[in-house]
Amino acid sequence: MSDLYHLGRRLSEIALEQMGAGNRDLTPGEFMVLHDLFMNGESSISDTVRRTGLAQSRVSTSVAGFVGRGWAVRAADPRDGRKTLVRLTDSLRAEGNRRRARQADDAPGGILSEVPPAERAGLLQALDRLHQLLVEGSPPPRLADTRAVA
C-alpha cells in the first residue's frame, strides 16, 4: 500500500506542476478549488465543498484569496440571497483554456522520455484505464471517509 500511496503522490505532483500550480504559488487544496471553479463555472461555496470534498472553511479561504488576487469575483445568488456565487475572471479562464489545450500525454514526458515509444503508449493507456475505473463518475472521498477503521 505504501508503494501505491507514493505513486499517487508523485502523479499528483507531476499533474500540479504541469497544470501550473507552482507558477501561481498554490497549495494542492487551493488548486483543487481553482480547478473545480474552472471546470464547473459559477458556483456556490457549498457546491464547491460538495464536489471537492474539502472543508467549507478551506474553500472559503481559498475563494477569498482568489478574489484578493483578482482571479475570481463574488456575487449574491439572485435565486437565494443567502448564498454567494463565485466565478473566475475571464483572463484567468483564458489562461486555463490555454493550459488545457496542451496534450495530457506530454505531462509525464520528462519522466517517460527514456521509455521506448511502445512501452510509453502502453503506460499512458493503463493510466487512462485507471482513471476510468477509479475517477470517472466517482465523487471525491472526504478525508474522514477514507481512513481505515481500527
Image (tube, helix red, strand yellow):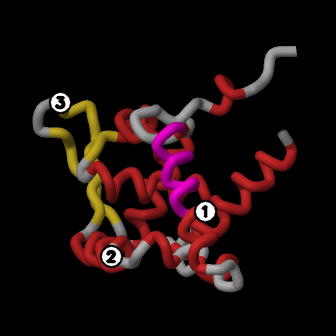
Please give the label number shown on residue 101: 2
Q: Which residues are magenta?
A: 124-133
How crowded pointer 1 is (Cα within 10 Å; few <14, some 14-19, many 20+) is rated as some
Q: Residue at x 84, y 49 (%)?
A: 3
Report whether 72 appears left or right of 150: left
At horizontal 33% and vertical 63% (from top left) the residue drawn is 72
Q: Nearer the viewer, residue 81 or 28?
A: 28
For image coordinates 29% across by 62% down, the residue present is 88
Looking at the rendered structure, the kind of residue marked 3 is Asp
Q: Residue furthest front?
A: 118
Q: Are marks 2 and 1 in contact (CB under 8 Å)?
A: no
Q: From the viewer's side, name the closer residue of 144 and 89.
A: 144
Position of 10 relative to 46 (above/below): below
**Residue behind mark 1:** 123
Residue 121 seen in render: yes
In the displayed structure image, the side of residue 32 where residue 51 appears, left or right: left
In this figure, which residue is indicated by the disc labeled 3? 80
Q: Amino acid at mark 2?
A: Ala
Q: Residues within 10 Å of mark 2 (few under 14, many from 20)?
A: few
